[in-house]
C-alpha cells in the first residue's frame, strides 16, 4: 500500500532535519523508492532542503527502502582535516571523503543504493527525459556530455525523469521517473549557467574524484509527475566533441542492444527476462548515435526529432 505523502515547502525539510538530526532525518520520496536521509551536518541539511525542495516527505510510518546517513567519522581525524562518511543501515560501504563533500557523497551513495541493491527494475546508466508521453533514453559513460545535454533539454520543454539512472519496469516496459538533483561537472557548470541563466546551482564542491561538482534542483513539474511513467520512444548514445555539428546517425538494433547491456547495472540478475526486456525496449525505440558540439544545435535537432514523430 502506497503511504500518504505530504508535500512540504523548503523550510519544512530543513526544520525536520534540524529537529531530528542524525536520529530521525527525513523520508524523501524518490520515484518508486523512499529514502530516509539523516545527517547532523548543517551543510548537508542545507543542501537537502534546497535541492530536494520540490520533493514530498513520507510520514514517519512509511516503509523505507534505503536508510542512509552522512556524518563525520569518529576519531582524532575528525578535528584534523575533517572527513565525511556515507552509511547505509549503519554500515559504511565506501571510504571517507574530504569534509566538504558531504552532499555529493550522499548523491553518489543514493545512486549506489538504487543500482547496487534494488532489482525490482532493470537499471541502466542513462539520462531519461519525456516529450509527449515518449521517453528519450541517453545511455553513456561519464564524460560523454550526457548530463549537460540532459540539462539543456529539461530547460527546453522536455520532462526530466532522471539524469543518471534509467529504471525499466518488468512487465510494462515503461521507464519510471526518479527525478533528483542534477549533477554537473567542471566546464559543464558554466555551460549550463550560460544556456539557462535561471538555473540555481548549489555550492560548487572542488577537488572531488570527478573534479568540480555542482547540483541544481529538478524542476517542480518533473517532481510532481514522479508517478507518470513514459513508454520508450528513442535511444540515443550521445558524445560531446568540441566544434562538431549536431548529427544523429541511425544505429542498428543489434548494436543498440549490445551497447545497452554495457550500460546496464543488473542485466545479469534478470537473466532471460532481462534479455527480453532490453529487446522489447530496443524494438519500441528509434535508435541513434549522436555527436554534438553546440547545445543550441543539439536542442533544435531533438525538437525536430520529437516533432517528426508526431507529424
Image (cartoon, rainbow, N blue to C red):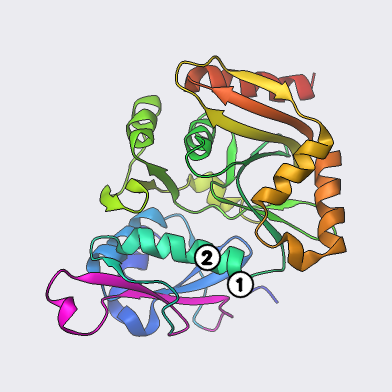
Residue 231 part of the magenta segment: no
Residue 308 lies, in percent from the top left, at: 76, 19
Residue at x 34% of width, y 26% of height: 194
Residue 270 lies, in percent from the top left, at: 79, 65
Residue 146 lies, in percent from the top left, at: 53, 38
Q: Which disc number belongs to residue 112?
A: 2
Residue at x 37% of width, y 29% of height: 191
Q: Is residue 208 above or below residue 25?
A: above
Provide the secondary structure element on which disc 1 rests.
helix
Residue at x 45% of width, y 54% of height: 54
Near mark 1 (Cα within 10 A), the count class, few <14, some 14-19 or many ≥20, is few
Q: In which quadrant of the rendered image does the N terminus lie?
A: bottom right
Viewer-nearest residue: 168 or 54: 168
Label 1 near label 2: C-beta < 8 Å? yes
Viewer-nearest residue: 148 or 218: 148
Provide the secondary structure element on which disc 2 rests.
helix
Q: Which disc number belongs to residue 186?
A: none
Q: Is residue 182 above or below residue 9?
A: above
Q: In which quadrant of the rendered image does the C terminus lie?
A: top right
Residue, disc 1: 117
Q: Is residue 65 left or right of residue 106?
A: right
Q: Is residue 76 visible?
A: yes
Q: Is residue 137 above or below residue 192?
A: below
Q: Is residue 128 above or below residue 78?
A: above
Magenta span of residues = 61-90
Amino acid at each position: 500500500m502506497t503511504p500518504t505523502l505530504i508535500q512540504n515547502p523548503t523550510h519544512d525539510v530543513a526544520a525536520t532535519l534540524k529537529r531530528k538530526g542524525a536520529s530521525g532525518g527525513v523520508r524523501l520520496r524518490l520515484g518508486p523508492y523512499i529514502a530516509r536521509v539523516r545527517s547532523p551536518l548543517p551543510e548537508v541539511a542545507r543542501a537537502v532542503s534546497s535541492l530536494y525542495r520540490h520533493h514530498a516527505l513520507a510520514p514517519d510510518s512509511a516503509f523505507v527502502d534505503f536508510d542512509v546517513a552522512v556524518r563525520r567519522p569518529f576519531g582524532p581525524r575528525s578535528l584534523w582535516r575533517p572527513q565525511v562518511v556515507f552509511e547505509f543501515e549503519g554500515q559504511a560501504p565506501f571510504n571517507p571523503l574530504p569534509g566538504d563533500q558531504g552532499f555529493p557523497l550522499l548523491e553518489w551513495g543514493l545512486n549506489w543504493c538504487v543500482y547496487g541493491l534494488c532489482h525490482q527494475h532493470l537499471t541502466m546508466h542513462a539520462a531519461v527525459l519525456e516529450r509527449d508521453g515518449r521517453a528519450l533514453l541517453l545511455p553513456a559513460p561519464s564524460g560523454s556530455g550526457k548530463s549537460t545535454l540532459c540539462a539543456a533539454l529539461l530547460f527546453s520543454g522536455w520532462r526530466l525523469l532522471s539524469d543518471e539512472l534509467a529504471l525499466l519496469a518488468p512487465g510494462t516496459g515503461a521507464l519510471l521517473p526518479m527525478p533528483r538533483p542534477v549533477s554537473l561537472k567542471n566546464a559543464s557548470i558554466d555551460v549550463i549557467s550560460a544556456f539557462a541563466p535561471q538555473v540555481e546551482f548549489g555550492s560548487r564542491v572542488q577537488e572531488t574524484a570527478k573534479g568540480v561538482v555542482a547540483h541544481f534542483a529538478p524542476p517542480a513539474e518533473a517532481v510532481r509527475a514522479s508517478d507518470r511513467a513514459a513508454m520508450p520512444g528513442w535511444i540515443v548514445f550521445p558524445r560531446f566533441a568540441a566544434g562538431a555539428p549536431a548529427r544523429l546517425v541511425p544505429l542498428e538494433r543489434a548494436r543498440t542492444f549490445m551497447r545497452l547491456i554495457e550500460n546496464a547495472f543488473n542485466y545479469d540478475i534478470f537473466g532471460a527476462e532481462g534479455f527480453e526486456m532490453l529487446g522489447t525496449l530496443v524494438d519500441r525505440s528509434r535508435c541513434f548515435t549522436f555527436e554534438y558540439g553546440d547545445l543550441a544545435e543539439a536542442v533544435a535537432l531533438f525538437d525536430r526529432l520529437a516533432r517528426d514523430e508526431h507529424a
